[in-house]
Amino acid sequence: MKKRLSDDEIRALLRSADPLLDDDGPSETDAARLRRAVLAEARPATRGWRLAPALAAAVLLLVALNAGFTLFESRNHAAAPPAVAAHRQRSAAEPDGEETGRRQQVQFVTANGTRVIWVLSSDLSL
Amino acid sequence: MSTAEPSSTERLGRLFDLHHRRLYGLARRLSRDAEEARDLVQESFFRAARRAGSIPPTEGGAEAWLVRTLVNLCRDKSRRDAVRRRAAETMLADPGEAPPSPEGALVARAAIRAALLRLPARRRAAVVLHELEGLPVKEVARVLGVARVTVRWHLMAARKDLAVELAPQETKP
């Protein structure tokens, strides 16, 4: 037969087994060491948070620059008529007045952004 | 130049000075040994350091935040160690396996501690805060962040479990 313990008996048992009866807690030295460790843990976190806005600003600046450059490029291409663009491409692709080989390439971009590449072969006779 | 860092660390330092002894006492009562208790206190303050912004500004709120963090850490640890803990505590708590020795009182204390450790972490915390620290139910509820009725329910269930767990030792000749 098991005897059912009353609430008071349970409380008394728990108090008799309280580990703090024979434990004075951490020494002053241990507490000081732990305190230093805790404060050291706090510093990198605060530094990180201070850097966060600067990082976000740098990323935003990069994105804005990239977007501006892309817009500038696309406007430039759109503004030039196909013939001019083709001329530009050709002159960039080959030395003046000379064929670079048996094939010539002409590239241009139309006003709505379509890129056209023509490859002209000197062997081709119509 | 910034004032945020010093004030944050200063506050943490002040919280440490105010509460570390109390937290250690609670951790010691909730955990198996002093080393585990020190680890729990350390991790609680580390969390406070990492999440300084989530600590309530009031003194009572900060204390409750620290206690809840410690209880949660204790619960997590209990879950991780569940299998190993059960095996070890069963051996300690089984009166049939307790060696008859002059250290009987020590064994009995270990058995009581083991029975307490077998309770779920939050229930154990409610028992320790109410029965050992002497906090009223209302205060236990505030510190643990639960309703009073929940605390009463935990206490009732814990007493029931402990009454069954500890009774055989009382009837042992």
Image: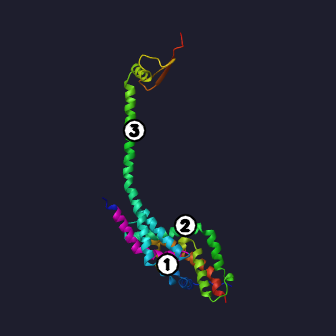
What chain is tagged by disc 2? Answer: B
Which subunit holds the residue at mark 3?
A: A
Instruction: Please give the residue where the numbered disc 3 appears in the rendered image.
Output: A66
> Is A65 in front, or is B169?
A65
| Residue that carries the numbered disc 2 in the rendered image | B76
Residue at x 66% of width, y 77% of height: B91
> Viewed as shown, does residue B77 lie left or right of A69?
right
The residue where tag 1 is placed is: B130
In the image, B74 versus B133, the foreground residue is B74
Q: Quadrant of residue B61?
A: bottom left
Q: Quick check: do tags 2 and 3 share a chain?
A: no
Q: Is residue A51 left or right of residue A126?
A: left
Q: Is residue B98 above or below residue A119?
A: below
The answer to whether mark 1 and mark 3 are in CB contact below 8 A is: no
Q: Label 1 neighbourhood size at 10 Å, few (<14), some (14-19), many (20+)?
A: some
Discs 1 and 2 carry the same chain letter: yes
In the image, are marks 1 and 3 on the same chain?
A: no
Which residues lie in the magenta part?
A: B5-31
**N-terminal label among 1 and 2:** 2
Q: Specify the farthest residue to the top.
A: A126
Chain under disc 1:
B
Tell us which disc is closer to us: 1 or 2: 2
Circle 3: residue type:
Asn
B51 above or below B93?
Answer: above
Element at label 3: helix
Using the rendered image of the protein, determine whether residue A92 is visible from the camera's viewpoint. yes
